[in-house]
Image (cartoon, rainbow, N blue to C red):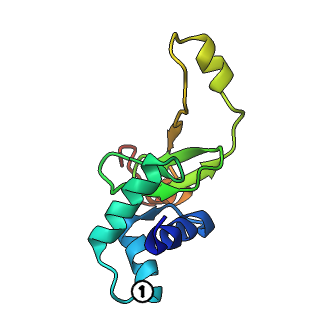
Amino acid sequence: MTKNADQILEIVRTSTEHLSAEQIYLCLKEANKGVAMATVYNNLAYLYQEGLIRKISVEGYPDRYDNIRRHDHLVCRCCGRLSDIWLDDLTAQLQKQTDVPILSYDLKISYLCEDCMKKKDINGKDNIL
């Protein structure tokens, strides 16, 4: 693994947020002023393909990256905020219902975050979605 890939992996593993490629680039740039955005994208693709990080895609938002520790996500339907949630592992149950080996799954539960619920209450609108 290259030095940049190793640094990117460390950034993703230690972050308490779900970082976009741009956010990772800004973190990496602090340690390596000469790094290019293409380097970040290439290394994120490599780390994802190797199963060392997770890529979380939410429609309408840039992909975000996360550690591979087993967990699921809450996704605010209004603002796209991602939050970790730890539910029981469903792999065995899903495997019983399919005829193919399950490598992993990505459960994203849609909800309205507290901030968006407050906006809904303030604006008096029922359809902020």
Q: Is residue 48 left or right of residue 93?
A: left
Q: Residues within 10 Å of mark 1 (few under 14, many from 20)?
A: few
What residue appears at the point 42 percent right and 86 percent down from the top-left corner? Answer: 32
| Above/below status of 38 relative to 89 | below
Q: Where does the C terminus fall, quadrant-wise?
A: top left
Residue at 40 percent of width and 79 percent of height = 26
Residue drawn at (40%, 55%), measured in percent from left and top?
Answer: 46
| x then y, percent, for residue 83 | 57, 54
Q: How many marks?
A: 1
| In-front residue for pair 61/126 | 61
- Residue 121 visible in image: no
Q: Position of residue 107 (x, y in %)?
A: 53, 36
Query: Between residues 31 and 81, which one lies in front from this camera angle?
Result: 31
69 relative to 23 in the view: left or right: right
Q: Residue furthest right?
A: 88
- In the foreground, 90 or 54: 54
Task: Relative to 90, say whether 37 is above or below.
Answer: below
Q: Position of residue 6 (x, y in %)?
A: 52, 69
Q: Return the residue nearer the eye: 15 or 114.
A: 15
89 above or below 97?
Answer: below
Is residue 107 visible in this depiction of the protein? yes
Q: Amino acid at mark 1?
A: Asn
Q: In the shown orientation, is residue 63 left or right of residue 113?
A: left
The residue at the far front in this view is 1
User: Please, is residue 92 above or below residue 63 in the view?
Assistant: above
Q: Secondary structure at mark 1?
A: loop
Residue 8: give x, y in percent of width and height: 48, 69
Which residue position is annotated with label 1? 32
Give the residue drawn at x 45%, y 51%.
48
